[in-house]
Amino acid sequence: MSSLEEKEIRAESPAPSCLSMKSDHSKDFPPVFSHEPGPSDTIEKGSHACVEEQLCCCVLCQDVLKDPVSTSCGHWFCRQCFTSYWDQAASSGDSPCPHCGEKSSIRARLQTTSQSSCEQTIAGLQEVLDEHKISLKRRYEHVSEGTDEKRNGILLNNIYTELYITKGQCEEIHNQHEERQLEIASKKKTLDDTPIRCQDIFEAVCDQQRPIRVVLTNGVAGIGKTFLVQKFTLDWSEGLENQDISVVILLSFRELNLIRDEQYSLLELLHIFHPALQKVTAEKLAVCKLLLIFDGLDETRLSLDFINRKLVSNVTQQSSVSFLLTNLIEGNLLPSALIWITSRPAAANQIPPDYIDRMTEVRGFTDTQKEEYFRRRFNDEELSSRIISHMKTSRSLHIMCTIPVFCWITAAVLEHMLTTEQRGELPKTLTDMYSHFLLVQTKRKKNKYLEGRETSPQELMEADREVLLKLGRLAFEQMEKGNILYYQEDLEQCGLSVTEASVYSGVCTEIFKRECVIFQKPVFCFVHLSIQEFLAAVYMFHCYNNKKTEVLQDFQEKDISSLDVFLNRIMEKSLKSETGHLDLFVRFLHGLCLESNQQLLKGLMGQTDNIPEHIELIIINLKKMNILNVSPDRSINIFHCLIEMNDVLVYQEIQKFLKSENRSENLSEIHCSALAYILQMSDEVLDELDLEKYNTTKEGHLRLIPAVRNSRKALLCKAWLSETHFEILGSALMSNPSHLTELDLSFTPLHILSGNNSLQHSAMKPLLAGLESPHCRLETLRLKCCRLTETACAALVSALKSNPSHLRNLDLSKNDVQDLGVKHICVFLESPHCKVETLSLSNCSLSEISCAALVSALKSNPSHLKHLDLRENNLQDSAMKELSDLVKCPHSRLEDLKWK
Ligand SMILES: Nc1ncnc2c1ncn2[C@@H]1O[C@H](COP(=O)(O)OP(=O)(O)OP(=O)(O)O)[C@@H](O)[C@H]1O
């Protein structure tokens, strides 16, 4: 649809009939406004028009109110519409409000108030709303981006670069560590998803049936969610976009955490966080079209319980903040207000999908947007071009720049290196980049707070050693606990004062600076999770060098006899983590072993002995590392660690392997992890991943499994997958879009034996979830000899049935399916979703009963089955007669029946 068409549709959409005035206060008649243009100021124009429009609308006829009347519950109608409704309702003895159903003696409460008093209400409101706009504009036009020195200096509009936002979310990434989510997200960007513009977040698209009230926007850490909502709010407050909304209220979950144990009404809450709205009463609020934005659901310490919540339907009713929120989301409180929530993916499921009208996902910057970011950032074109071309030379930097916060880190480091008289190579690995970043921050701090001569990196680090190590300790201890936000008490436990932390605001951001009673409690976090992980790694290295055994032991690391053994143990620990929460941390630890980074951070980490000998051993260890039952996604991190150590041999060998025609070359496990990573990240979708074609060990084959995410055919016969591999398969089928059209799992048992020797199909669960997904495009599924039982058949059929299936070929041969299993399959064949054309049930212990069931299913309409294989079931001629007749029948599609 062209943007012009979109605009037309938008313009035609009816004005909101949304007034819900649930307060008990008396209501005034709305005036009939003239439609003369408002004052020349754009801010006023927009909101004024909106308040008028809303008040002029009859809830019954949706048209401009004529001779308006209102009910005690606060809904407005044309007198005539209302009288005819009331006459009908009264004859049935019942007269609830036609809009909300509230029972009241409506006629008695009809009010006739003068037009002038209502005009007064609106006039007062307009003034307050304008003040609110000005206050929002003041609050969001400047951004601090972590660095104290430029606070109030950078205009959001100057640096804001359009983000890539799409509809929907990628289910498969929820349980992954942020870093892996990013890799998947970056890969997805090349795919053709229609982007949504910041200002169109609530805009209904043609296929959207219901109006969009609640929007949930997902995105990994640092991807730009907060910038997005701030930009939206700024554009609105400047009168540029979404002027049909009369009030935008932006709240962050961080702020709400501070009052989580207190009781407030929604009105009080708005007054506290947006003092410019102090004069807005419940009645005034009720006539406004409201947008409430809640930023950062992942940071909430409120528990959002949608089941055991107390009903709150009035804006003056006091309750806990979490009840206010659940009621707002459910639509009990301010049912016509728009709600926009942002969250990191892992926390998004706190809101039941039924309450969400639209899901969007911020995917960061596309390749073009990355470049635009750097060009906007620097006025110096030569500088931005050099930074862009450097970013392009390193694949990992280029991928990382998908996240805006990493672009900011890169910009800070490279600007510093290219504009000062720095010599030596520009950082290529992540650890290089972060080491320089720390140095730049230290230097910045020095320039601002200290004076004096130019200092070497070592001197700089030494000067700040104490405070940086305290920050490192905080990062390390909180990483272990999974915390990302800290309060003063947390800092003090690590010996840090609030002042020290504030001075380091380039690394650690002080969030609450506002002079409001509620904000007196400062809250801290690292600018990005990856910075926390980096500082944690620096701190760990410092502890290793200084033999701080108690810290290392707390991390379950007892053997610190040599660096290679030490790193080996930590690597093993990280590989066993299901979520990969230590992946980036170990990657940094390995990068920090390099002589260059050791030199850079020597003042901080101290001296490490015998580096060159250790390096060689560490690399050897990584290459031969092979731990049982580790997810192949985790194993890929071993390859990343090699890259951080500047060992690119494996990478080069795999590139060579991919270029050569000869696939018989022997591949080690680490080669397979590298190959899986490269195939998975490739812009081209692989036609076929056939494990048997790769000459490697059983473990090597399993390490290739992540590549299914970017393959059309996955031939995984005899691979003996475990649950973690099925999870990857499930995620490949669920991803949007999913490429997999053919999956062969023959000779892979789909069940495990439980303690009491009964068969359990838990391994299948992620696979079934994938088959159920609306994104699944599987056309061929081969499950030959997979030890499928009748119950597994039932589960499989139920997954296939729940979805308009694309499945054309299903091979279930050599399974003990039996007649009961066939009964389930027949239900699938009869379902209107079923498009299966080829079905093999050979050697499945079937009897005549199955034949009869199949006949009945195939006669039902519309069956697509053309080829049916029932061989090796010992079926009698007589039992097969009816089935054979179906082949001849002109109405049947069955053309090929094998049974002997
Ligand atoms: N659209 C953008 N244009 C320019 N810079 C951006 C943009 N979005 C984000 N950034 C940069 O990235 C940083 C982090 O962005 P932001 O705080 O919005 O991320 P987030 O998704 O809210 O992260 P988190 O989940 O960690 O809170 C910003 O401080 C800014 O430097």
Image (spheres, helix red, strand yellow):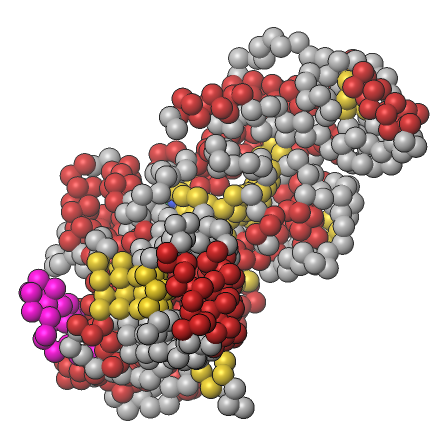
Residue 690 location in percent, x, y?
Answer: 22, 69
Relative horizontal placement of residue 197, taking residue 632 as reference (left or right) = right
Residue 368 location in percent, x, y?
Answer: 25, 41
Front position in the image: 479 or 72: 72
Q: Is residue 651 magenta?
A: yes
The quadrant of the image that shows the N terminus is top left
The quadrant of the image that shows the C terminus is bottom left
Q: How many marks?
A: 0
Q: Is residue 792 visible?
A: no
Magenta segment range? 641-669
Name the residue at 55% across, 63% down.
488
Position of 442 relative to 25 (above/below): below
Residue 513 location in percent, x, y?
Answer: 53, 48
Residue 169 location in percent, x, y?
Answer: 44, 51
Front position in the image: 263 or 446: 263
Position of 761 relative to 375 (above/below): below
Q: Is residue 287 magenta?
A: no
Name the residue at 58% across, 29% down.
245
Q: Which quadrant of the structure image shows residue 665?
A: bottom left
Relative horizontal placement of residue 291, taking residue 819 as reference (left or right) = right
Name the residue at 40% across, 43% down.
165
Q: Is residue 308 visible?
A: yes
